[in-house]
Amino acid sequence: MPDGVRRSGVIESPRNERVKGYRKLLKRNFRHRERKFLVEGIQGVSEAIKHYLKPECLICDQKGMQALDAYGDIIERRGIPCFLASTSVISTLSTAATPPGVLAVMPMLDIDLKSMLETGPSTLVVADRVRDPGNLGSMLRAADAAGAGGMVVCSQSADLYNPKTVRSTAGSIFHLPHCVGLSMRETAVALREQGFSVIAATPHGGREHWDFSWPERTALVFGNEAWGIPQEDEEFLDVTVRVPMLGKAESLNVAAAAAVLLYEVERARRVWSR
């Protein structure tokens, strides 16, 4: 667009009613009640602009508005409101140490597990009580990068729509189908009915990942960062695997382990198909 992004208005005060309403989206209960979440930074916002679910609005400072010029045609074609805001407004809505110059207000993207399974995925990721928002977001990003078919975030995990989690996905939250809020029991029962093997990653015990014959339909379960899969959820597992520690490290970060195993599943399948 030669004239840049068209402004829908200017917001100067954090006490603005729109800003006060959106600030509530920093709280998990309000996010899920309103079915909306905040996206911070140009990387995530650029993906939000292109997603089939249209952002409710964009809020930018002057630099953020300039960064959005490259997407001006999409913003105008889709009729996405874009507000120029003061630095104090951006700071009020951001949880980042250095607030970005652009934010989007988005409707939640999750789908139910039945809809996810209708696409016929061969690999899914299940987060069972992964409590750190950054780890959860990085796991989703790894799943997207490795070509997984979707991710299930069980009810006792961190909130996938936490601003830190959303930032950690680096835009992948808009690419990878995901389901939230089910228990591990509900997830395992539904997956087994569709022919999935439920396989948990564990730092100790289990088969080494490169000596394991990965099933045609694999659901990889990752547990809590500190204590792994809780004992009460072990009955829902078919088998456990581990990434061997070849150096002196005690274990891998859960997101790093997810990346290793997801790529190993894909590598093994390509070998089999030759």
Image (cartoon, rainbow, N blue to C red):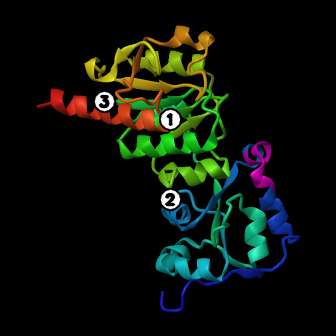
Q: Which residue is mark 2?
A: 51
Seen as rendered, the residue at the extreme bottom is: 3
Please state if 105 lies on the left or on the right of 42 as rendered: right
Residue 148 placed where, x, y %? Answer: 38, 38
Point out which mark residue 253 bears: 1
Seen as rendered, the residue at the extreme top is: 235
State the CA–CA distance, disc 1 to disc 3. Answer: 19 Å
Residue 144 placed where, x, y %? Answer: 41, 45
Q: Which residue is mark 3?
A: 265
- Whether 21 is drawn above or below 213: the answer is below
Please state if 66 lies on the left or on the right of 242 as rendered: right
Residue 30 lies within the magenta run: yes
Seen as rendered, the residue at the extreme front is: 248
- Whether 34 is drawn above or below 187: the answer is below
- Whether 155 is drawn above or below 240: the answer is below
Which residue: 88% across, 70% down?
15
Proximity of marks 1 and 2: CB atoms separated by less than 8 Å? no
Which residue: 73% across, 70% down?
90
| Three-letter residue code for mark 2 | His
